[in-house]
Image (cartoon, coloured by chain):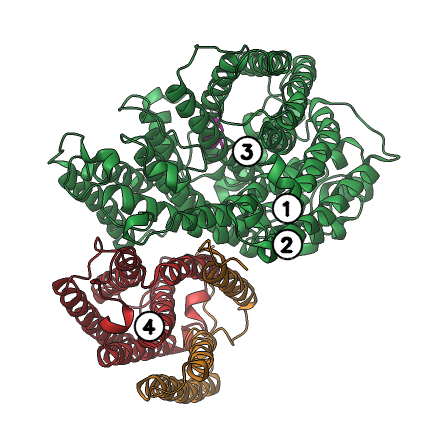
Chain colours: A green, B orange, C red
Amino acid sequence: MAQVKGKKAGFGAVLWDYLTTVDHKKIAILYLIAGGFFFALGGIEAMLIRAQLAIPNNDFLSAGLFNEVITMHGTTMIFLAAMPLLFAFMNAVVPLQIGARDVAFPFLNSLGVWLFIFGGIFLNLSWFLGGAPDAGWTSYASLSIASPGHGIDFYAVGLQIAGAGTLISGINFATTIITMRAPGMTYMRMPLFTWTTLVAAILIVFAFPPLTIGVFLMIFDRMFGSNFFIVEAGGNTIIWEHLFWIFGHPEVYILILPAFGMFSEIFSVFSRKRLFGYSAMVFATVLIGFFGFMVWAHHMFTVGLGPTANAIFALATMAIAVPTGIKIFNWIATIWGGSIEFTTPMLYALAFIPSFVMGGVTGIMQAAAPADYQYHDSYFIVAHFHYVIVGGVVFALLAGLHFYWPIMTGTMLSEKLGKLEMVIFFIGFHCTFLIQHWLGLWGMPRRVFTYLDGQGYNAANMISSIGAALMAVAVIILLINIIKTLVKNEKVGRDPWGDGRTLEWSLPIPAPYYNFAQTPLIRGIDVLALEKEEGDGTIPSAGPVEPIHMPNNSFIPFMISLGLFIAGFGALYFASGKPWAIDAVADLPVRPWALYVLIAGLAITFISMGVRSWKDDLGYYITKEELEADLRELEARERGAN
Amino acid sequence: MAHHEPEQLTETQLKYLRTERTKEMRIQMISFGLMIFLTFIAFALVALELDKNFIVPIVIGLAFIQVALQFYYFMHMKDKGHDFAKLLILTGLYFAIAFVVCFIMIVWIGNPI
Amino acid sequence: MAEMRYNVPNDQWPVHPEKATLEGRNKFVGFWTFLAGETVLFASLFATYLALKDQVPSQDHLVAAELYHLELAFVMTMFLLTSSLTSVFAVYHMRNNNFGKMQLWLGITVLLGAGFLALEIYEFVEYVSIGHTFRSSAFGSAFYFLIGTHGFHVIVGLIWITLLIIRNANRGLSVYTAAKVNTASLYWHFIDVVWVFIFTIVYLLGVL
């Protein structure tokens, strides 16, 4: 139970520890590793796309394979890379920022990460089991119902499993931030990253159920013979588009809001100033979250919803620019007059402002419904969403990785390599996507696997592909940096950036597994900066050293996720060759075992849940003596380091 | 922290709590009666086959009243400490109505607004 | 701090036993958050149903007005509404530290819920026998998915509450089990909330 200290644990013990852990700091590592892996996978797919499009009439990838690669690139990057990596930082930082011992539901936290990992593996197994999904990451029903083979089934089942994990994590973080704040940590004293996490978590709670339903409709149509999208039987494929975008638009805010939060922290730390306009920032965050739900049909202007509907959604979309603008100006005002330190995270943050604004401006262009008829399905769209997602979210992930690396691993990434990586990534990013705006306006449609010579697309596509290669170089530099740092393993002490302003930087590094030996007392916003100015930089305690209640590790989350993973295969092959199946799978060989696999998988899941409910899981206590011994040891270590 | 310091309640406090709870149960019974009554009216209105334009808004209105009773009384949303529950459920209901209205209005191409 | 204490005397039983511990409070807030998500989940289902209502491939398929029986829907509503009240009783006795009566009312809730479920199964069997199935039309798919998801929630609720009754039978009441019972009861009420919309929007407005 109490973790192994000092001693080197065997590989088996470490593995078992991570398989059963409910500690948010270890779960953050799991998210980081798995998310990083899928990020690399999605990156390789991106390289394949750009290699194929670098020259006209290329036959590097076949048309069918190209469709699979673009679909998997989008799906992997959004669901399996960006969101899990954000969850990694949320897990690592948010409980420390609010002065909590752990998240509200440590068990569910573990369940969330395992569902995501199994969902991601399931989705990617499609490459080896008859072909990946090929209907685009939006998987519009008219395309996906017709797509032959099991590719789309992997998409639907994989997303269902991973999506369940995300929903669980969303509920978990919302609850954590509502109930687990330390004494004195009022809502209006919460760091911005905590605020954006709260709003993003609530967005997840409202956005993922529609996706669940949409994906269920897809699963039932493709695997169980229902007729939601089968037009001959009265179905309607537009339902999928609505459900998908009801989820899909909030999803981009789920991604970008935590990114905004991280940048807010970085700006204020490396400008050595309080965040300008804190309450306006909070207000803008909430407003963006709310508006995010009212705009989904702007992805569907060309569907034919009618002028009234288009006008309403166009107007709502443009309104979002207002709170986003408030944020941009507040960040600029935060830097203004600050004593700026150009670290790697700060460089990313500075690069983020113009990059993201460019993506935002093209967003407003598309919000004008009549003009959108021109941009729709062209490379202009591709350029726009990469500007906001790479220029916003990926910049934030890379900045956050450098910024929070000490908290997560106890070491510091090399600043020299980091800055090199940042410069190359920045150049590569603009090189890749800026030119794509023009490509779109010149008429190049998105999702085409090649183009003819002599249309004027050649040079621009080559430039774009070179940029993509530069980004790959930057990521490789980052990998080298990470490996070098881990091998060197030079430990750093408290507050390694020297200017930490919020509670997470007040903790010793690595933080003890119970986080806070004594519950901290929060006296104001940016509490560490406050205590540094008014005192000796130590956070006062809200009470004496008391026994701490800790949750038990559990293997059940792994089993629940494994059950769903197994059941997924049963569902997937259920319709193969059945007389009632859709044309796409009707000719495949019959799999008589499918039903039994489905039942067995669900049985594993539900029995595991039953066991969880049946057993008393009361956790255990860390005694006062243990805590005091730890505190003494820490004091000795820090005195020795000085 | 899993442990809670059991506060010793005095005899009077206990008695007071019990009467308060009995009072609350009386209110619960009344709201149950109301729910049954509202259900009955809704079914009766439809069974009587009155004008459709008249029935539809009333029946939907009755459903919302009944759901409010269920949330506020049966699920204790009227009690203290339910601020977040209220905020989340009301936001959820708002989104719910928006989705349903959109699906009725703009899903079928051919009669766009 | 102490071991989890079961069956404490009345004067030591907290005023809000379900929220007496941090875990209990977390469960309470987390479950309401979950219910907010469920609201949107069912909204998506209702929206899909309304978009696909009466969308059948040909004239010889039955549509809503020809299918639904108001009598059956009324009886089912009574079952579920009453079971909602009985679970209020269970929570009332839980707060009063009366373990036996709490178990009794939970048992009655399960029985009423099972009655509801039996009627729903009867309804489904009858529809299937006259050709209205999950695979017969888009309307059929949407109908069974909406009502079936609600029915699935009822099944989960029944298993959950039954499991709680059995597991608590030889443990008794503590702040730990009180939080479990309270959460299950919230879930059960929510099932009733959804049913109110189902009988209104699907059945009542369906036969108009």
Mark count: 4
Whichever of labels 2 and 3 marks the residue nearer the N terminus, that label is 2
Same chain? Circles 3 and 1: yes
Q: CA distance from mark 1 to mark 2?
A: 7 Å
On the image, the x and y values in percent for residue A472 come to: 56, 14
Marking on residue A377: 3
Q: Are marks 1 and 2 in contact (CB under 8 Å)?
A: yes
What span is colored magenta in the figure?
Answer: A28-33
Say which of C200 and A146 sits in front.
Answer: A146
Q: Chain of mark 3?
A: A
| Image coordinates for residue B16, horizontal then vertical, percent | 47, 87
Q: Is residue A32 magenta?
A: yes
In the foreground, A483 or A508: A483
Q: Mark 1 Cα within 10 Å, few/some/many (few <14, many 20+)?
A: many
Q: Amino acid at mark 2?
A: Ala
Residue in the image at 73% along x and 26% along y: A351
Q: Which residue is denoted by mark 4 in the rendering?
A: C206
The answer to the question of whether label 4 and label 1 lie on touching residues, with beta carbons closer than 8 A, is no
Q: Is residue A620 visible?
A: no
Q: Spatial distance from mark 4 to mark 2, Cα to Cα?
A: 32 Å
Cα separation between marks 2 and 3? 20 Å
Vertical side of B20 occupied by C15: above or below: above
Residue drawn 70% across the image and 22% down it: A344
The location of residue A71, given as percent across then percent down, is: 43, 29
Q: Earlier in the sequence, mark 1 or mark 2?
A: 2
Report the residue marked by disc 1: A369
Mark 2 — residue?
A: A311
Q: Please give the name of the residue rendered at 52% of the width and 49% of the height, measured from the top-left corner.
A: A304
Instruction: Check the residue under mark 1 and report the chain it is in.
Output: A
Q: Which amino acid, mark 3?
A: Asp
Marks 3 & 4 on one chain: no
Do tag 2 and tag 3 residues touch (Cβ < 8 Å)?
A: no
